[in-house]
Image: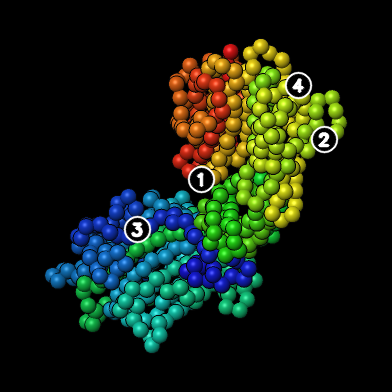
Amino acid sequence: MFQAILACAAMLAGVAPAFAATPTLLWGDDFNQPDGTGPDQTKWVYDVGEGLWGNGELEDYSNSRANSYVISDPDALDGKALVIAALKDPIYGTITSARLQTATKFQTTYGHIEARLKTTSSQGMWPAFWMLGSDIYTGVNWPDCGEIDILETIDASTILYGTLHGPGYSVGAQSTLPGSANYSQAYHVFAVDWEPNQIQWSVDGKVYQTVVPTGGGAGVSTIPAGDQWVFNNSPFFILINLAVGGTWPGNPDSTTVYPALYTIDYVHVYGIPPTVPTGGTASAAGSNVVNLSWTAPSDLKGFTLTGYQVTRALDSGFTQAVDKISVGPSASFADATVSGGVTYYYAVAAVSTGGVSDPSAAFSVSTPEPLPAIIVPPGGQVLNSGSTLVLTTISAPGITYQWSFIPQGSTVAQVLSDTPLDAASDIVSGSNGPQLVIANATSASAGTYTVTAQYSDGSNATSAPALVSVTQSPNPGFLVNISSRAFVGTGANILIGGFYIGGTTSRSVLVQALGPALANEGVPGVLQHPSLAIYNSAGTAIYSDNGWGSGRVLLDAAAAAYAAPVLEPDSGDSEVLLTLPPGGYTAEVSGADGGTGVALCAIYQLP
């Protein structure tokens, strides 16, 4: 039952996340207008007239403020309520009341329909909260249109009646309060949960009747065999009224008290959330992607599935690093925002027009340690002799590194070690760290470089090879291109590209931090707003920006340097054109505004 969703969710076996089903509020009125005003005319219309309502009723339904008005009420949840008053004219003896309905303002098919209200308690009074099939206005007569009576009481108001009327039948049940208390003495919540082939009545969250078309069991009623169930796929509207007299309650007598007041705190209509997705599984497709799948909910309760909410955390109790990811209606999802060497816990909730379901049972996966990726462009690195080569890989605590090298024209790998500064050969440093530096490159520096990462759990992984070519040039240190791509975030999770300007003259260098531009290359999960900072060898920041540096002229400079990826002029990419003296520099890319995702750092010396 709807009212028990929140209370019971924490008791569901196998459900770890501490959150529960949430219904969608489809329509409602809390009657919180100023005192003395009438009902909201955008939500309600009046039925008016005398002798039109059958049952031998005596009242004349009116739209007068004397018969329906908003009051302040400390017992109402928001301190405001609507009163429907039955009045008797002291001279003429005529009786007036009010009947409100939503036929031209709101209709619903299925849902949880509830009102919090106090009835009257006097001979001849007949307060009601009910629904009618909207096709009554298109020529379908009552009861063929269908009627759902959520609340009816009469006279002393000690018995609650919930009834279903259809073509040729009426099925109903009663409910009483403990000690036969009177429903007019305090507010109570009256509701039905209406879904395909089932309607369930409750008062204060306690179910007292369930009706289905066929196949009822213990505590479940059915309509007569062979009769038509007219409550599927058909819109209904809401009515609230206070009838007086008639064949059921009988007419008022000398004990009847006027005015008779019927008080409504609120009327709410909610969707009903779907059932829980089941069978959740997760598998790692590498260190940065987890493939998830699950079984769709078995019952949408008459509403339309719109998608799923995937909840991810770093613990089974879903308290650490909790992320909620909204995905489409497919019962699978590739999570490309994970890191290698981490155990992730997932739960999936179904989202429909009726609300969000309870979460599925938790399921988990451990991603493999990430492969070390050397930061070089896909086509390799070409250096002029005398330049400095800087290669960078992932950096994380607990990882040790070893760089290796196969000289050009050879097939034998050499394990690199740092070279003393006075050695005649290339000066090598960082051969056991995340950044390899070879100063004063010569033809002997040409070949392929790899790095092996040794992880804290004893496993290791070797990068793909990076090809480096060295050309002879009278202009040593001519930097052609350095670029790298990695998952970037905030804090220590940044991308660092090192570069060195050789020679004796300053060089024009174009530095880019690209995220949105990568989307054109089919890269998923890109960083939407990369931030770019450039530091000299002394660690002093010489540039910092979250945008396009020196203006749109940089697009022309970029076009002269390379052809792809296609830039996004109005995106959050960052770019700057600087003239730098010889020396070492670093370009650092991080996520502006706390963002995370895949980014590319590209560094070009321009002609």
**Disc 3 or disc 1, which is closer to the eye?**
1
Q: Quadrant of residue 434?
A: top right
Residue at x-position 42% and y-position 65%: 114
Foreground residue, 246 or 343? 343
Residue type of the residue flagged with mark 2: Ala
Foreground residue, 136 or 367? 367
The Cα–Cα distance between marks 4 and 1, rounded to whole angstroms, is 39 Å
Residue type of the residue flagged with mark 4: Ser
Q: Are marks 4 and 1 in contact (CB under 8 Å)?
A: no
Q: Of the two numbered discs 3 and 4 on the same chain, state the one appearing first in sequence.
A: 3
Residue type of the residue flagged with mark 3: Asp
Residue where numbered disc 2 is placed: 413
Q: Which mark is residue 29?
A: 3
Residue at x-position 63% and y-position 76%: 217
**Disc 4 or disc 1, which is closer to the eye?**
4
Circle 1 packing at 10 Å, graded few (<14), some (14-19), many (20+), is: few
